[in-house]
Amino acid sequence: IRRRREIAAIYDQRLSGLVELRLPPGPAADPRHFDVYQNYEIEAERRDELRAFLDSNGVHTILQWGGKAIHHFPALGFTVHLPVTERVMARSLLLPMNTSLSDEDVFYICELLHAFYRG
C-alpha cells in the first residue's frame, strides 16, 4: 500500500498541471480519506488517442470494465440509460499502478502525458 500511495503522489504532483486530465484525489488531499490506489484511474480528453500514444511508447493502460458503462452489462438487469456514466467511461483510463514500478518509470509515464498534450 505504501508504494502505491508513493506512486499516486508522483502522478498527482507531476500531472496536476494538465487541464486535459481529471485526477483522483491525491494521497494528502483529505486526512479522513485513505486510498490504497488499487488503480490509478484518470479522466482524459482524447482518451483513445492518448492510449494509443502511450502504447506506442511502451506504456500499457487499461480501460476499466473494457470501457463499458455498467448499464451495458445486460446480466446486471439495468433498464435505464445513463448518459453521464457513458461520458465518464468514454474518458476513463487506468494508468500503470504496480508496486514494481520505479520512480523513473512513473516519471517517464508522466513525461509522455505531458508530451502528448503539449507536444
Image (cartoon, rainbow, N blue to C red):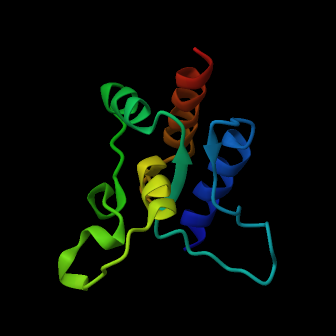
**From the viewer's perspective, is residue 35 above or below residue 4?**
below
In-front residue for pair 97/86 = 86
**From the viewer's perspective, is residue 100 above or below residue 117?**
below
Query: In which quadrant of the rendered image does the C terminus lie?
Result: top right
Give the residue at x 67% y 41%: 15
**From the viewer's perspective, is residue 64 above or below residue 57?**
below
Residue 50: quarter of image: top left
Picture coordinates of residue 65 (x, y %)? 30, 64
Picture coordinates of residue 115 (x, y %)? 56, 21
Q: On the picture, is 47 further left or further right than 78?
A: right
In-front residue for pair 48/16 = 48
Q: On the picture, is 54 further left or further right than 41?
A: left
Q: Work out which residue is located at the far left of the displayed protein and give it.
A: 75
Q: Work out which residue is located at the far front of the displayed protein and give it.
A: 80
Give the residue at x 69% y 35%: 18
In-front residue for pair 75/38 = 75
**From the viewer's perspective, is residue 91 above or below residue 84?**
above
Picture coordinates of residue 6 (x, y %)? 63, 60
Q: On the picture, is 68 further left or further right than 54?
A: left
Query: In which quadrant of the rendered image does the N terminus lie?
Result: bottom right
Give the residue at x 54% y 37%: 45
Give the residue at x 31% y 60%: 68
Q: How many marks?
A: 0
Picture coordinates of residue 48 (x, y %)? 37, 36
